[in-house]
């Protein structure tokens, strides 16, 4: 066990549930100490650099009806779109030219053979136009193990699937109560992804109605016990065209959700020092410097949005989603042209 002495207390890496609960409840100097030690851990175990993933939001068509999400199936307000293959390849070429190192191809959950084979073809084409140089992360929800394998063989090597909340009863209050949205499916999908050979990313929303500090501590322990390689966490942001909007009166202020997310990032960095942690767009929608603050709290990945301008508006998971692409960081701190794989995965 590694101990560090700081101004107010001893920080150690294998924090207990009780300690996590206590640290999640702190502010002021104690929170500053979390961020400071998280930064130190990040530098030592994950490296000094921040890695880029160009985010391409492929389609807002989804078969699911998560109660919080602006592109849920029953919300007919957004105009449905799916990028053409040319649009995806153009965005990938841009990422390659700008030395982003990797892209994330993300979209709603669709299990049709047409969708699966299009993604498979796009993965091969992106690999081909970049001479194998662009790393590819996927985020297309729950799929069969056979689909995960097809996409892996085609050349994708990382997959993001958030657990949203590791507390099964809370999960059930933010999803419809049917087999399509079963908690166990999510757990099984995370296991299948790992078995297929992907670097696996998960994450949670922070500040959900009904969520407690204990739930958040358990989320951190869930990620540690699942031995994940990457994490993307963000504040929950209410969307007027979703059923969960009815519970907006129960929410913490946006500032508190933001601050809690910073502490979650810092504590996860202490628990899992060598994983990749994203500074997410949802942070930026509360605070214009949200992603930079997340990096200062222990994150090491940013995902500039490369979705064509005319489609960005329709990919609104939550309201006030920012569309700024650039990040305020000195160039020498960015891992240009590198995949920036999870060091944790390499040690598996
Ligand atoms: N607020 C914050 N994050 C959201 N997501 C979906 N809807 C919202 C919302 N209202 C997140 C989920 C999902 C990811 C793609 O976007 O965590 O996994
Ligand atoms: Fe679909 Fe994901 Fe939104 Fe759920 S959160 S409705 S799976 S896009």
Image: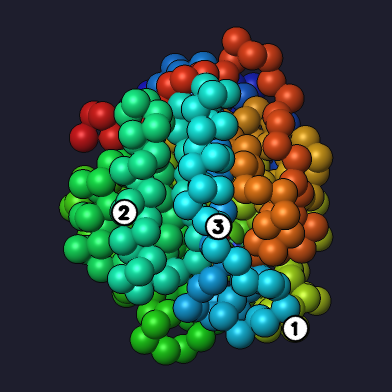
Q: Residues within 10 Å of mark 3 (few under 14, many from 20)?
A: some
Return the residue at label 2.
120
Query: At x 70% / y 37%, what residue is drawn?
Result: 325
Return the residue at label 1.
246
User: In this rendering, is residue 290 above or below 308?
Assistant: above
Query: At x 57% / y 32%, what residue is drawn?
Result: 94
The answer to whether any part of residue 215 appears in the image is no
The image shows residue 315 at horizontal and vertical percentages of: 65, 61
| Residue 83: mark | 3
**Which of 117/293 is in front?**
117
Distance from Cα at disc 2 to Cα at disc 1:
39 Å
Disc 3 is placed on an element classified as loop
User: In this rendering, is residue 333 above or below 146?
Assistant: above
The image shows residue 281 at horizontal and vertical percentages of: 66, 46
Q: Is residue 107 shown left or right of residue 250?
A: left
**Which of 133/200 is in front?**
133
Distance from Cα at disc 3 to Cα at disc 2:
15 Å
Q: Is residue 211 shown left or right of residue 128?
A: right
The image shows residue 271 at horizontal and vertical percentages of: 42, 38
Task: Work out which residue is located at the far front of the displayed protein and give it.
Answer: 86
Distance from Cα at disc 1 to Cα at disc 3:
32 Å
Mark 2 or mark 1: which is in front?
Answer: 2
Disc 1 is placed on an element classified as helix
Labels 2 and 1: the sequence-earlier one: 2
């Amino acid at each position: 066990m590694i101990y560090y002495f700081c101004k107010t207390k001893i920080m150690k890496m294998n924090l207990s549930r009780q300690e996590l609960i206590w640290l999640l409840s702190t502010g002021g100097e104690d929170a500053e100490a979390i961020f400071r030690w998280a930064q130190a851990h990040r530098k030592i175990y994950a490296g000094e650099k921040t890695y880029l993933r160009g985010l391409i939001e492929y389609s807002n068509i989804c078969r699911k009806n998560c109660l919080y999400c602006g592109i849920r199936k029953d919300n007919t307000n957004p105009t449905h779109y799916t990028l053409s293959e040319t649009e995806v390849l153009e965005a990938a070429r841009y990422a390659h030219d700008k030395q982003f190192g990797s892209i994330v191809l993300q979209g709603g959950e669709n299990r049709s053979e047409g969708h699966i084979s299009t993604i498979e073809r796009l993965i091969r084409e992106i690999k081909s136009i970049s001479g194998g140089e662009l790393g590819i992360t996927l985020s297309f929800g729950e799929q069969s193990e056979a689909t995960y394998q097809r996409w892996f063989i085609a050349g994708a090597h990382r997959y993001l699937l958030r657990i949203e909340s590791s507390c099964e009863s809370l999960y059930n209050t933010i999803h419809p109560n049917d087999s399509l949205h079963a908690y166990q499916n999510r757990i099984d999908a995370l296991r299948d992804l790992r078995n297929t050979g992907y670097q696996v990313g998960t994450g949670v929303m922070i500040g959900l109605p009904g969520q407690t500090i204990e739930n958040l501590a358990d989320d951190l322990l869930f990620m540690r016990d699942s031995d994940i390689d990457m994490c993307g966490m963000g504040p929950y942001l209410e969307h007027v065209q979703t059923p969960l909007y009815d519970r907006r009166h129960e929410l913490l202020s946006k500032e508190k959700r933001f601050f809690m997310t910073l502490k979650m990032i810092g504590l996860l960095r202490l628990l899992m020092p060598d994983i990749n942690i994203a500074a997410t767009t949802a942070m930026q929608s509360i605070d214009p410097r949200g992603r930079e603050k997340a990096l200062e709290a222990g994150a090491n990945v940013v995902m500039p949005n490369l979705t064509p301008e005319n489609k960005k508006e329709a990919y609104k998971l939550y309201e006030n989603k920012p569309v700024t692409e650039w990040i305020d960081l000195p160039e020498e701190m960015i891992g240009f042209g590198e995949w920036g794989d999870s060091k944790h995965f390499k040690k598996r």
